[in-house]
Amino acid sequence: MRKTISIAATVALLGALTACGGGEAESSGPVTLRMTTWSANPDHVKLFDAIAADYKTTHPDVTVQFDALPFESYTTTVTTQIAGGNAPDIAWILEGAAPDFVASGALTPLDESIDDAADLAPTATALWKQDGKLMAYPFSTSPFGVFVNTDLVKKAGQKLPAGDEWTWDNAAKVAAATASKTGKQGLVVRDFDYKDWTNLATVFRGWGAEAWTADGKTCGFDQQPMIDAMTFLHKAIFTDKALPAPGVAADFFAGESAMTIAQISRASLLKEDGFGWALVPLPAGPSGGYSVIGQGGIGVLKKGKNASAAQEFVKFFTSPANSEKLAQFFPPPRKSQLNADTLAKANPLLKPEQLQDVVIDGIENGVVKPSHAGSAEINQAVRSGLDPLWKPDADVAGVLKGVCAAINPLLAK
Amino acid sequence: MTDVLDRTASPVRSAPGRRPFWTTRRRDQLTAYAFITPALLGALAFVFLPLVLVVWYSLHEWNVLADTFNFVGAENYRKLADDPNVPAVLRATAFFSIGLVVLNLALALLLAVLLNQKLRGTTFFRVLFFSPVVVSLLAWTIVWGFLLQDNGGLNGLLDAIGIDGPNWLRSGGTAMASVVIVQVFKNVGLNMVLFLAALQGVPQELYEAARTDGAGPWTIFRRITLPLISPTILLTSIITVVGSLQVFAQISVLTQGGPGTSTTVLVYYLYQQAFQFHAFGYGATLSVVLFLIVLALTVLQWQMRKRWVFHEH
Amino acid sequence: MSIRTKVFLYGVLLVLCVPFVFPTWWMITSSFKPNAEIFSPSLWPSSWSFEPWRQVFTMQPFAQQYFNSAYIAVVVTLGTLVVASMAGYAFARIRFRGQNVLFLLVLTGLLIPSEVTIVPLFRIFNSLGLVDTHWPLILVPMLGPPSVLATFIMRQFFITLPGELEEAARMDGLGRPAIFRRIALPLARPALGAVAIFTFLHSWNLYLEPVVYISTRTKYTLPQALTQFTDAYQGQLWNVQLSAASMTAIPVLIVFVLAQRQFIEGLAHTGLKG
């Protein structure tokens, strides 16, 4: 009996080990492509399915299956699938994970697979290129703007500063006054929640601060611009109470705050019969006007079973015609579509001047949120390094120095 | 399954012969091996095989994205020794496990004793205390996340009685305690039910005898109740200790390991390394460490049972 | 017991049950609140909306997912009962060579957090072509670490059975399998009940594994489906999510309320005493 068991175990062990190393042959005939996304939204799914059905009319052999994974653990789940030998054929990639995916060699270059690649805005593709080759297509290039609950601001007897007056100092003043008069919150940096600090780039870029230098080698947290920006932020949170304190949840779109910094695509969360609202660019900081964009890319994994069929489909998915359809949810990276007319058709909620100020100018001049190879580990280190800052009596410069001490070894990797 | 065994066993039993090869003892042994075969095969396929593979992975530098899988020998273990986060992680793990086990067992015992009183309506309370066990862990944790916010339900309640509650999940001192307590409320009902069953199994005569001897309630509890339910305490403490080292969803929903690294327990850290930082080799190394810790603790508890568990043979 | 002691005991029980009941209460009532009201800790919705409960079914193939979770949990529970009672019985009542070593071997499974083995297991199932099927969710809990706990509980129970019963059965000419089936197993009903509840809940609440193994929406299990109720930009639709969470909890709660007497008293009668 025991012998049988040990033989069975050996067989199972060998089976598993050899299976790890096996390669899959490219299959011909009917193909099912699996594309991982982080959107389970029915409207999105409907659009994707429509595009896939459209594709099937010309490629009857190809079925595309959209696999919506939970956003919170998206990159993790994709990585697990790759580790387990079940890589998706096509994957959405978050901007934070972009450098890892782009530099790792896990993706197939897409230059051949994008129609009219010259049409792509250079600021949009910068993050997704490796040695001049486009490794993933930034299907969503969404600038950050400030949504304002005009009803709430009016109720507090405040006026929204316009033109040159739209500065961080004034924005914080209005936010603080509205918060104290209405009992709601002032300005919410959406999705920051004192954890995802990369969203703070929408604030500190106004001081010209950067998390690290463009080459990714030198920490920027202990530099003067960052110290100034964080000092401002700290005062706005703890002294002026213009921003909700740590651990306080407030959803702008449910009417719980005066303003929020969010990507413009969030406009669809506003209800037609809800409160009055406005969308304005990020306020000017001491270093002038600026804009920040968040991105999502779409890439073809080398380890997928049907890489060439996948490339074909990506070509179709990102074609100018489909890009226009996707534009209603995801601002496109195509310059030819970055005009108020095209965007207005896709985003009926937004006025042409809002589209021009925030979206079109934003994408052309924007910098992408901070990202770096090994970003998950760096983000984790920055997050825990910044934790001591979120107390009323924090030593801003000291904390920021600590952040640099924590991430310098990681940046050097 | 049992039918099959019956049928295969019966012709053997009726086989003729003066000194049958199949003595009762042999037949018993065969039955035993047959009975444990599914469990044993399961253990081999789903415990030992993966475990061997994890040890194998831990000797490699394995970056999934870059598709590298290089043998590096003990490199990951050297990294472990140099990793500045490890002491804090181990401290957090110990704090969580000890806190959870002590609070869980104490509360479970308290509830069980309360519900073992001759009171009307104990069934009702029993159901209430047990109910979180059947609520989805994810939902339970999310709800508590709301309650523990700085402007959440708990501080609202404290405010009403004039106490300025702390920012539970965001300050170093209270974050870990909060996670422990959320977990205790979630699962204490299970241990409570087991304790209750054990308490109800204690013969009433023993209590009466002790009372006639003039023993007070505390003495009775310590001298009679505790020893008699000690096997259950052993069982629940093993389950709770092992469970406490596997806490994951709670940390990931409530604190994500913060503030700082104050709630980064070992499972969470290995999950971060392997799945978030793509360092599967190092993650596997941490898995090996976790396994060794659990193994050591369980062996320790099992050894100690002879010391304090009543009527364990 | 004096009235004062009684009042005191009731007071203690009432205070103690707040943290146990409030979250569930809040989960159920909030599922009827409009999404904007979710963050308020109010005990009662200002207006009742049944819309979220309906949305649960329009946003996901929720009925199918419900069925998936239910049938997987039932299969796992039945399978575990068979595997664990047989192994538990053999380890407790039959002396055989290698008994202790093999028991420790099996017991090791109790010590393995699922995060530790998920990657190798994923590779194994992938090489068998079983990824995105329900097999890993059935096989691993039924034969792997979770069933070890069940085996352990069953062994601890069978140890307490008086040996005379078996001797008597043996005199009547029963073999081991028959003793197990006709004598030991019927006596073990309470322990089997405990194991069934543990196992069912474990399978019902499994989260990491389905997220890793299953990628087709119609094959999802409930905990996995729970995280999928989001708006266009991954904002959580809390009220829909809480409706779905309520729906997963309420039936189990009802079953427990109905069966708890048998469960607990059954345990008490024979005693899961070690």
Image (cartoon, rainbow, N blue to C red):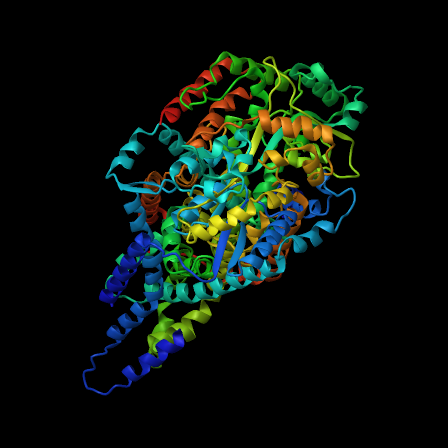
**Which residue is most to the bottom?**
B16
Q: Quadrant of residue A260?
A: top right
Please report the residue visible at 53 percent of the width from the left and 42 percent of the height from the top.
Answer: A115
As rendered, which of A35 and C261 lies closer to the eye? A35
Q: How many marks?
A: 0
Say if B41 sits above or below A241 in the image: below
Q: Is residue C227 visible?
A: yes
Q: Quadrant of the C terminus of chain B?
A: bottom left
Q: Position of residue A334 (x, y in %)?
A: 58, 36
Q: Quadrant of residue A289?
A: top right
Q: Quadrant of residue B165?
A: top right
Q: Quadrant of the N terminus of chain B?
A: bottom left
Q: Position of residue A364 (x, y in %)?
A: 59, 27
Say if A214 sits above or below C156 in the image: above
As rendered, which of A281 and C228 lies closer to the eye? A281
As rendered, which of A370 and C53 lies closer to the eye? A370
Residue C97 left/right relative to A264: left
Say if A192 sits above or below A139 in the image: above
Residue A399 left/right relative to A177: left
Please report the residue visible at 77 percent of the width from the left and 21 percent of the height from the top.
Answer: A181
Q: Is residue B219 visible?
A: no
Q: Position of residue A410 (x, y in %)?
A: 38, 26
Q: Position of residue A85 (x, y in %)?
A: 39, 51
Say if A307 sits above or below A127 in the image: below
**Which residue is most to the left?**
B19
As rendered, which of B285 and A344 lies closer to the eye? A344
Residue A351 left/right relative to C248: right
